[in-house]
Amino acid sequence: MSTTAQELDARGLNCPLPILRAKKALNGLQHGEVLHVRATDPGAVKDFDAFCKQTGNELVSSEQTGGEYVFQIRKN
Amino acid sequence: MSNVAELSSNRLPQDLIQKHGSALDAWFDERFAKKLKEVEESKTPSLAIIATKGTMDWAYPLFILASTASALGWDVSVFFTFYGLELLKKKLNLQVSPLGNPGMPMKMPFGPKWFQGINWNIPNAVMASVPGFEKLATGLMKKTVKNNGVASIQELRDVCVEAGVNLVACQMTVDLFGYTHDDFIPEVKDWIGAASFLPVAQQSDVCLFI
């Protein structure tokens, strides 16, 4: 069971801000903690996938609800 | 004894090769591929950018790529030369010119959607002769950027500085255009020439000229 350690509201922000903000937020987390990101930029779906692959953080979930995208990233 | 001698001269004994040659090849290939993968995976990717333009439309791709690469954990170096030095000024005052820039759409960032969708095809002769046209275009671009939740150049540059991107500037350009180091942000790590940056570019995985 993963509990969210921090929420990041990246709604209304466009590429590459959601990634940059997420990176900053992850810096403040401990290993294993989960960052919950909400975004509206459709490009964020592929970007977060690539970001997690590259940085070794785990993309626990990537979902679309309404016009929003929700990501859960576990810090490695 | 003779085996040792042969091994020490980087040759395997003939009988060993004859007996197990293909197995040795296969072993080596497998081992080599594995090692290579290990080396590649443990390597931090690097990006080197040569920034030569000092307008807003050229600054965006540069700072977006540099800041994103730093967020991905890459080592990033940017060499600012010629007009690119404008991007390191303490006070950013970047303009964008639609004149002689036919790829740039001229759209209005306000009003109803149909109105915002119109691309105003303004002839170069008009753009060139109307005073303040560049200021107007810059204002419109800034408004468009803001409306769309795109970061400002200042914000992206701050991210680069915070992430420790290696920002280096061309000393020759500083002399050429009569600048002083004091005109630029103190985070400029070094004042160098082409001969110093090319080896950095050579070692990088990705090198871009913007």
Image (spheres, coloured by chain):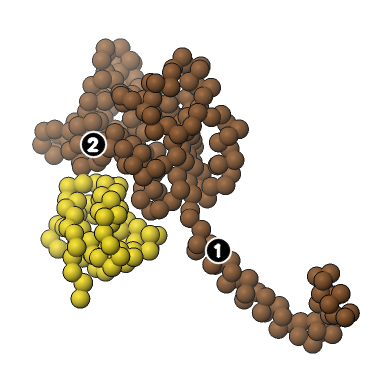
Chain colours: A yellow, B brown
A30 displayed left or right of B25: left
**From the viewer's perspective, is residue B72 above or below residue B20?**
above
Which image quadrant: the C terminus of chain B? top left
Which quadrant of the figure has residue B182?
A: top left
Specify the amino acid type for callout 2.
Val
Which chain is home to disc 1? B
Label 2 CA crowd tier, 10 Å (few <14, some 14–19, many 20+): some
Which chain is home to disc 2? B
Q: Secondary structure at mark 1?
A: helix
Badge number at residue B194: none
Q: Position of residue B175 (x, y in %)?
A: 50, 17
B10 displayed left or right of A12: right
The residue under the point 25% across, 30% down is B141
Q: Which residue is mark 1?
A: B39
Q: Secondary structure at mark 2?
A: helix
Specify the amino acid type for callout 1.
Val
Q: CA distance from mark 1 to mark 2?
A: 41 Å
Q: Does residue B109 show up?
A: yes
The residue under the point 37% across, 28% down is B185
Q: Tell which of A32 and B67 is nearer to you.
A: A32
Q: Tell which of B132 and B130 is nearer to you.
A: B132
The residue under the point 67% across, 75% down is B28
Find the residue positioned furthest to the right. B2
Find the residue positioned furthest to the front. B1
Label 1 CA crowd tier, 10 Å (few <14, some 14–19, many 20+): few
The residue under the point 38% across, 25% down is B184
Which image quadrant: the N terminus of chain B? bottom right
Q: Which residue is mark 2?
A: B145
Q: Earlier in the sequence, mark 1 or mark 2?
A: 1
Q: Position of residue B41 (x, y in %)?
A: 50, 63
Find the residue positioned furthest to the left. B112
